[in-house]
Every structure is written in structure tokens, then in C-alpha cells.
Image: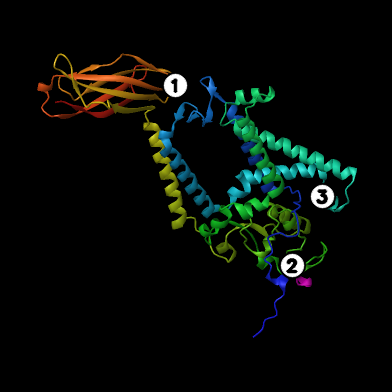
Amino acid sequence: MKFDIKEEDMIIKPYKTDGPIYVREQKGYFQKIRRVMSWILMLSFILIPFIQYNGQQAVLLDVAQQQFRIFGLTYWPQDFMLLACLFMGAAFALFFITVWLGRVWCGYMCPQTIWTLAFIWVEHKIEGTRNQRIKLDKSPWSANKLGKKVVKHSFWLILSLLTATTFMSYFISATELYREMFAFEWSNITGGWVFLFALCTYGNAGWLREKMCIYMCPYSRFQAVMFDKDTYIVAYDKTRGENRGRRKRKEDQKKLGLGDCVDCNLCVDVCPAGIDIRNGMQYECINCGLCIDACDDTMDKFGYAKGLIKYTSEYALSGGKVSQFRLKLVGYGVSTVLIFVLMGLWVFNRVPLETSILRDRNALYRVNYEGLVENTYTLRIINKTQTPLHFNITSDGVLGGVLNVSKNIKIGPGVMHRVPVTITADGYDIKKKITDVNFTIQSVEDSDIKLIKTSRFYRN
């Protein structure tokens, strides 16, 4: 048996081979919500590094010094479990929102969406409406076209550079970063990272856009696994909309045998992913609601009821009642709350002090000229607060043991200080050859900052 297969049929065509997506500007209820949230998130992103607390930057993720400072708390590599809990809690929160409301994170809060729509807004202001942009791209190169392209890309690059600089201010002191920027004193490392992030922002929001969500973001791939028939999605009501077709505003649609969809194609024109929501649920959809606003505007103009495209669920479209108490939804919700509660308890009970004990490597013990047994230790104490503190060290567990250590040891914020310690005791008073000894390290200024560490005392 011989099959007649053409060579072009064997080529797997990539998504959107017809060039860039020209997004039409749209106003409406959901667009207003997104713009308000975008402004709140962008302003928060810009202003947080400039917030001061106790005379220093409130939020600073200082990788060079290996410390994360969040207002009055400082976290170190030893606090890695907290970061792991934060990521797990955020993941379960995202799963919970996805099962409940679909991909609203992608449509309203994802930085990729916010920056992409900001770049599209700049494009719209400089090159014009959707049709004007299409016409401009198809026209031959001229001074007018070149000028608009140069201005647009210049604004994109400026916005990318500001974004990258703001991002770096979370890792380098904002005052120091901007002072060095205006004085042209950036180090090669700082400048390299800023320009790398600027290039990534420019490429992602200016060029890749929806391709970043479709091809590179794993969330768009595995989110379908979390969906169920009660998950809220942006959906087209085929029962009401079909048969679709164009008509004049005053024409009777029933006589024409048409549904409410006037086939204006605006739902496609405003979609950042370039999909047709009327074809059913697609993984490219980011639940942004732009098609809902566009369709509602058209329904208003024709005197039809809104909601031909709306936030609904597969079960609701089939006439069922949505259940908000599903096992998967409740499970994700309980897991999210539990993780954050445990994390809160860990933070509340956390002692901003770290201590490790090193014994003398040369000898387990030694006998001095008085015949007394001595054990030598080195305590490495890290002050994990943001202020200098004084510490006292005491010990117990060794009968008749005398602790030889300095008093009121001052340790600066974020400083690791080595303290040599010696315990001397009469070997005849101690019954066991190995005895547990407890060291208590306590702050003079704050008695709640206290840590007890256990080591061993050896005798002959």
C-alpha cells in the first residue's frame, strides 16, 4: 500500500506562524481591575527598596553578605528551611487559586503579563491603534516609520533599564546603587547584572511576549492537571452564540437563524495570546478577561444581554451548579494555611542567635599544674539581629566546674564572633569519664535572646 504524502504536510508548524500579534486596546470592567492591580504591583516593586527601617533599608536580600533583611528580621543561610516553607506555601497557594479561579495569576498579577501589556501600551501611544500598527509594519521603510520604531524601542530600553535597576536594588543597597549609577561608578559585576536583566526584560516583554507564556512557562503546561469541571475559566457560551454571523444592528437575528455572536472578531483582536476563545478552552488562555470586555461592549451596541463570553465553569455551562467545597480545593486551601501557620510559628519562636561549639582538636583534655582537668572549647556565636548586643556565657552539668570566659562580650549585627572557653574541674569529683555540659548564651539587652548548646567534658 502506497501513501501519497506531500513534503509540506510532514512539517510541524509552530504556533502563530503568521507573525506578531497586534493587540487591540480595550477598555472595560476587567481591564480596569487589571490596570489598578498593575499600578499597585509596579509601584510596590519600585518603592519597597526605598523603605527605611531603623535607619537602614527595610528589605534587602544581601547575597554578598549571605543575609536577607526583612524589616526587623535578618535571615541567614542557616534559616534555609524558612525559605523552603515560603516556596512550598506559595506553590500551594497558587494551586489553590488555580483550582478555584483558573489562571487569574497569569492574567492579573504575573510580571510577564504586566510588563508585556505596559510595553504594548507604549507601542500603542507611539505607533497608533492596532490597524495603524499593522499598516505601519506592512509599509516600506521611510523616515516616519524609522522614527517611530526608534522612539518605541528607546522607550522600551529605558523601561527595561529602570526595571533591571529596581530589581537590583533588592540585592544592593538602593541608595548606594543609585548614587553609583549617577556617578558612573558601577562595578563590572553590578553593571553586568543590570544590563543582563534589562536585556531579558526587553526581550521578554518587547519581543517574546505570549511565546514566553506558551513555550517557556511550565505553569501553562501543568495547570490543566489542576483544573476540574468547577474551575472558573473564560468561556464562550456556544448554546447562546451559535450560529454566529454578521448582521446589522436592527436586524432580527431569529429570522436570520443566528445566535448572539455577531462574528466581529474583537475577542481575538484584544487577546494577548492571539487565540479565539470561541474554539473552547485552550492552554494559551491566561484568563485576562479582555475578550469579555470586548464582547460585552459589542452586546451593548446590539442590545443583547452581556455574558456571551464570561467567567464561568465547564459544569455551569452545562447547566449544573458550581460546588465550592471540592476535596481538591479544600485540600490545597488547608495545606496553604497549614504551611503559613507553621512558618509563622517558626518565625515567632525563632531565636536570632546562632552558636556552634568546637572542641580543642589537639587533646580531649589536659591536666594543669594543680592537678585539675581542663577542657577547652571555642564558641562561634552569630548575632542575627540588626543591632549590636552584649552576651554572657554560663555553663552547667560539670560538678564543681569553673568556667573561664570573658563577660559582656560585644558582637555586632550580623557578625560571627569566636569566644575561647575553658572549664576546669577536679577529676575526683566527677564520676563519669564523659559528662554532658550545657552552655547558655544570653543577651544582656534582651533576655529572650537565649540559646543553650550541649557539648561533652572529658576527664582522665
Closest to the camera, between mark 2 and mark 1, is: 1
Toward the viewer: 341 or 73?
73
Residue 328 lies in the magenta-colored region: no
Please tell me whether mark 2 sits on a helix, a strand or a loop.
Answer: loop
- Looking at the rendered image, the quarter that the N terminus falls into is bottom right
Residue 302 x, y percent position in the rendering: 78, 59
Amino acid residing under circle 3: Arg
Density class for disc 1 (Cα within 10 Å; few <14, some 14-19, many ≥20) is: some
Closest to the camera, between mark 3 and mark 2, is: 3
Residue reaching furthest to the bottom = 1
Q: Residue at x 61, y 45 (%)?
A: 110
Please tell me whether mark 1 sits on a helix, a strand or a loop.
Answer: loop
Name the residue beneath numbered marker 2.
Answer: 244
**Colour scheme shown:** rainbow
Name the residue beneath numbered marker 1.
Answer: 413
Q: Residue 306 is drawn in which quadrant?
A: bottom right
- Looking at the rendered image, the quarter that the C terminus falls into is top left
Q: Earlier in the sequence, mark 3 or mark 2?
A: 3
Mark 3 → mark 2, Cα distance in angstroms: 28 Å
| Mark 3 vs 2: CB contact within 8 A | no
Residue 286 in sight from this viewpoint: no
Q: Is residue 272 left or right of residue 134?
A: left
Above or below — where is 436 with respect to 132? Answer: above
Q: Is residue 298 left or right of residue 34?
A: right
Residue 133 is labelled as 3
Closest to the camera, between mark 1 and mark 3, is: 1
> Which residues are drawn in magenta?
254-259
Toward the viewer: 242 or 115?
115
